[in-house]
Amino acid sequence: MRTVILLIFYLIAIILVSPVLLVLWAVKKKDPVLDIGKWVMGVSRLILGLKIEVEGRENVDPAKSYVYVANHVSFLDGPLLFYVIPQRVRVILKKSIFRIPVVGAGMRFAGFIPVDRKRMSGGKRSIDEAVQAMKEKGYSFLIFPEGTRSRDGKLHDLKRGGFFLAVAAQVPIIPITIKGTFELMPKGRIFPRRGKIKVIFHPPVDTAGKTPADIPALASQVSQKLGT
């Protein structure tokens, strides 16, 4: 029943938001699109019966740019963090998601970046675009460095792309540990259960003066934090 209500809410939201997006596109205002997205995710959380406990929010300075790096155990993780992170945050997402009507166009306009995983150069191109956006516009980005959702709820090897992004843009990394979403909606489950979720913002990991040679050490440091 909760899922049906959520789908009805999404349908109504898309109908109402579509003309607003056209106006924002015409006047080139991107931040309100993200604010609308946060509101939608907040209402979705209430409909699904998800209770969120947040720890370490004081580690985030809303005036700074960051690369947020999180573990990934559930489909809930992305929408949840988009709502909880105390900034307007962009995400690098697989290209297919941008084909969703209205939503995909809104994400692309707001500064979300598609990545074509089928092409060898796809990841590098997306990272380069994100670096440029961080340097020129002060954006922050959310990355799931495992590349895909964990099937067993455990943290797996971290890919290097998010760390290249942080080093190239010379911005701090904030590791985020998500607990509880795997139990509520593991990979393969269609509908989430009600329950509690905990999100931990760890202290920033500095990248000032770091080079690509430092990425393995940065990844190891972040991996240790994500596992706590």
Image: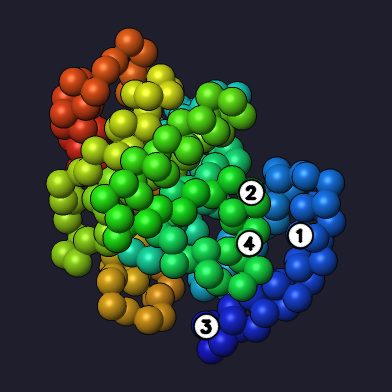
Q: Which residue is mark 1?
A: 21
Contact (Cβ within 8 Å) of mark 1 with mark 2 = no
Query: What distance separates the C-alpha of mark 4 from that of mark 3?
Result: 24 Å
Q: Amino acid at mark 1?
A: Leu
Sequence-first disc among 1 and 2: 1
* The disc label shown at residue 105, or none: 4
For disc 4, the neighbor class at 10 Å (few under 14, some 14 to 19, many from 20) is: some
Q: CA distance from mark 1 to mark 4?
A: 9 Å
Secondary-structure class at tag 3: helix
Q: Is residue 17 left or right of residue 214?
A: right
Count neighbours of disc 3 (C-alpha within 10 A) and say few if under 14, some if 14 to 19, many if 20 or more.
Answer: some
Q: Label 4 near label 1: C-beta < 8 Å?
A: yes
Amino acid at the residue labelled 4: Ala
x then y, percent, for residue 59: 45, 27
Name the kind of residue labelled 3 in the image.
Thr
Mark closest to the chain's N terminus, 1 or 3: 3
Residue found 65% across the figure and 59% down from its top:
106
The first of marks 1 and 4 along the sequence is: 1
| Residue behind mark 2 | 110
Write the residue at 40% across / 75% down.
192
